[in-house]
Amino acid sequence: MTESISPLSIRALQTAPTETREPKARDGERFETLLDRAVRESRGVKFSAHARTRLAGRGIELTEADRQRIERGAEMARAKGSRDALLVMDHIGFIFNVKNETVLTALDTSEMNSRVVTNIDSAVFL
């Protein structure tokens, strides 16, 4: 025994409403916000080509401990709502863009002795 399907029943199936919901995470935080944070934290701080060139030109090699200090400084700047921060570590300064998670350039002692750094909104001393 076979049953025929009418065009009306097919159209009804094609236009049936589907349930859409915004995914929510714990404590009412949006899933997208949690995902963005997890991705950002997994990537870590990047160094622009310019910053790498500046470090190499000055013979500065960063240890894993140095990189961890920079990561902590970046997190402190992010937590305070900074957009572009000067991260000062020992005798080196790093201009860090929070949104892009990127060290844009590095300053050595002679450059920091000029006592003026522009285009930043915060400074973090590591």
Image: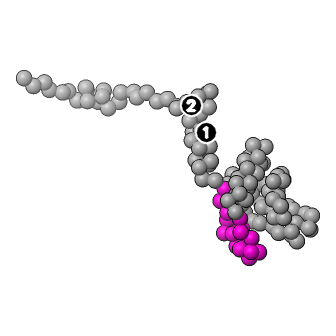
What residue is pinned by disc 1? 33
Give the residue displayed 84% in from the left and 64% down from the top. Answer: 91
**Looking at the image, how many numbered discs can be counted on the residues?**
2
- For the residue carrying disc 2, how many other residues have a C-alpha within 10 Å: few (<14), some (14-19), or many (20+)? few
Q: Residues within 10 Å of mark 1 (few under 14, many from 20)?
A: few
**Residue located at (80% from left, 56% from top):** 87
Can residue 106 be seen here? The reply is yes
Q: Point out residue 59 in the picture as x, y percentages from the top left corner.
A: 74, 74
**Mark 2–mark 1 distance (CA, rounded to whole Å):** 9 Å
Q: Amino acid at mark 1?
A: Thr
Say which of 51 and 23 sits in front.
51
Contact between labelled residues 1 and 2, with CB atoms less than 8 Å apart: yes
The residue to which callout 2 is attached is 25
Q: Mark 2 belongs to which amino acid? A: Ala
Would residue 123 appear left or right of 41 to someone viewing this image? right
Q: Provide the secondary structure element on which disc 1 rests.
A: helix
Quadrant of the rendered structure where residue 51 is?
Answer: bottom right
Residue 84 x/y as whole percent? 77, 54
Residue 80, compared with residue 98, is above or below; it is above
17 vs 99, left or right, is left
Tell me the residue at 57%/41% (across/down). Answer: 35
Residue 68 colored in magenta in the image: no
Residue 125 x/y as whole percent: 84, 53
Q: Which region shows up in magenta?
A: 45-62
| Quadrant (top left/top right/bottom left/bottom right) for the N terminus | top left
Q: Residue at x 71, y 65 (%)?
A: 62
**Is residue 121 something that shows in the picture?**
no
Q: Nearer the viewer, residue 41 or 69?
A: 69
